[in-house]
Amino acid sequence: MVLAQILLNGILLGGLYGLMALGMALVWGVLNIVNLSHGALIMLGGYTVYYLFTLAGIDPFVALPIAMVVMFAAGFALQWGLLNLVVRSKMLNTLLITFGLDVVLTFAAQLVFTADFRTINPSYAGANFPVLGLTVPVVRLAAFCVAVALAAGVWFLLNRMPLGRAIRATAQNLTAARLYGVNPRKLYAITFGIGAALAGAAGGLYGMISNLTPYMGASLTAKSFVIAIIGGLANPFNVILGGIFVGIAESLTALYIGPTYTDVISFGLLVVVLVVRPKRAVRAA
Amino acid sequence: MKTSLTLALAGLMTATALTGAAMADDIVLGASVQLTGTNANTGRYYRDAYQLTVDKINAAGGVKVGDKTYTLKLNMLDNQSDVNLSVRQYVQLVSADKVNFLLGPFASNFALSDSSVAEKYQIPMVQGGGASTQIFSRGYKYVFGTLPPADDYFASTIEMMGKLTPAPKTVALVSADDSFDVSVAKGTRKHLTDAGLKVAVDETYREGASDFSSILTQVKAANVDAILWTGHETEALNFIRQMKGLNVNPAGLSAFTVGVPTADFRKALGADANYAFGMTSWLPDASLKDRWFGDAAQFAAEYKAKFGYDPDYHAASGAADVETFVEAIEKAGTLDPAKVRDAIAGISFDSLYAKVKYGENGQIVLPQVVVQIQDGNMVPVYSTDFMTKPMYPVPAWDKR
């Protein structure tokens, strides 16, 4: 029973992990930018939901789409005004600029939000229900469902809508895409905006099950990176599966080896994936 | 790559923070504190307590050494919650800035590393942020601490558990893997065995962990009477929220080494903070008389008025560190580091924090008062006997 509960915990947590990585994988796959400020965007999304909830009294799940719109606008502006300037230069440049962005966003957040810990704490935050002797936390289940729904949305967008086809075309062959009338600058900005919106949703959900501080970004960026590599950049559902895989691996590690080793295992998995399937990682990078 | 960039940025910030050499009539206290980064939330207690106490002492006429009067100055750097940076900053403080004495950073793992700089350069460091007994078990002569030994943090809680009805019999011990918490866990295991309690779950997690669902599932399966938990405030928040989410509720109690005494913690958790037990080595009580502030209650009032939030034991401990230097310098009648060091070792004075007197190893010995959050307020519950009736046993989450 303990094992079943721990597997359930891992799966539910993994869905959220997958959502965190989804935005990073999308931006990485299409723009070839490894966005080191992805965690900071998650943090900003979390604070957006926090303030919508505490100041405006909007239910966090209703606030999620609002935060996504806000984060989309922020991401669009970032790409349009800043990252488009370096998007086709060497990867080191984009790494540097997104790292710088991470530092700026983190410390600006401390100035504006202070270092106080915040939780998004609606009345149902701790609610749970029993199923077959297992305890299912409502918010985690909801977070899992939101993650899967958003992954489905991204899949639909990429595979069934003209905009998504244009995004994929740009990623596959920029010249050909331009010949067909795609405006890459705008498309890049939209893609980064979607990535930021997904990060925003992840941040809001994270604030409901954990807590928000200006410094939460760095570790989330690292985790998203691992999951993006494991899940691959091509299919949104694979990213969610990658997240679930890491979530289960971490939970089982905590049970059998000890909770101090969870990071060893999740980053160890990264090394294993790179060794076993280097082609995928090369294509990804 | 990321590290070297951090270093470069840190270097820049340090360079701009230099305050130049000491003036002839100044006594400069150097410190590197977490003003930003993951520990900034607690680091601010030290920043604000140091500043308030220095200003207060200067306003009262400064420090008299023989027939000369000195003004206290602070040279405070931001270590960005990075241990390696803080060590470099302490080296800079003693070797380049030539400060007279050293105040400490927050947290045991910082104090553990930073105190080695003090020992190497033979400049006394009085630090109020590191409780781990590791800091004081190395035979260092220049390091003093105003937080009581981490090993004994749970001693009073365990003593209290023996007097509760029904008394908890089985315990889950959950601890982080950093210097302070390893020390707490080590001491707590011994205290639990001595008290005849059974440790049913004993899990250590990685510092900074945010997911406790695996540990909580094991705790729930073991059906323990009590959880003793040690770690950092942000982890305590996650732990309690996830306890509720997974419906883990020991019949007896849950006690935490950190978080419970801070207002921020109670605010973040809201009603879910109720019933949590915690501990503090200090309460803003008017019976604690102080030479500069009058008493602890007045200190707390002045602190709140100036900074807009309530001080906790971190702040009081930091204030006692500054006062220790002033008392010791006046007693020694000189600014010579070795003589001041000897004066600190033999000092005994009443302060807003406690009666300050350092043991053979340099660490103060103080009892931890057990506190509990009752209806959103922190209430002292037990020290050597019950002070208020604890709300016990703790009701299930859905019956609160």
Image (tube, rainbow, N blue to C red):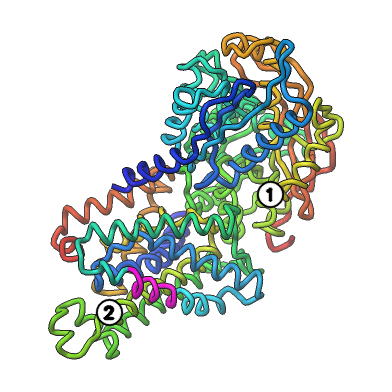
- Residue A185's label in the rendered image is 2
Amino acid identity at mark 2: Arg
Q: In which quarter of the image is residue A26?
A: bottom left
Q: Quadrant of residue A114?
A: bottom right
The verdict on residue A79 being magenta is yes
Q: Is residue B16 visible?
A: yes
Q: Mark 2: give few (<14), some (14-19) or many (20+) Cα within 10 Å.
A: some
Tell which subunit mark 1 falls on: B
In the depicted view, which residue is nearer to us: B326 or B385?
B326
In the depicted view, which residue is nearer to us: B129 or B123?
B123
Looking at the image, is A173 positioned above or below residue A5? below
Cα–Cα gap, marks 2 and 1: 60 Å
For the C terminus of chain A, give its image quadrant. bottom left
Residue range (magenta): A72-82
- Residue B251's label in the rendered image is 1
Q: In the rendering, at what x and y percent does residue B159 appear?
A: 72, 30
In the depicted view, which residue is nearer to us: B221 or A53?
A53
Q: In the rendering, at what x and y percent does residue A238 appear?
A: 29, 70
Amino acid identity at mark 1: Ala
Tell which subunit mark 2 falls on: A
Residue at (24% x, 80% y) in the render: A184
Would residue B232 appear left or right of A238 to someone viewing this image? right
Would residue B329 appear left or right of A156 to someone viewing this image? right
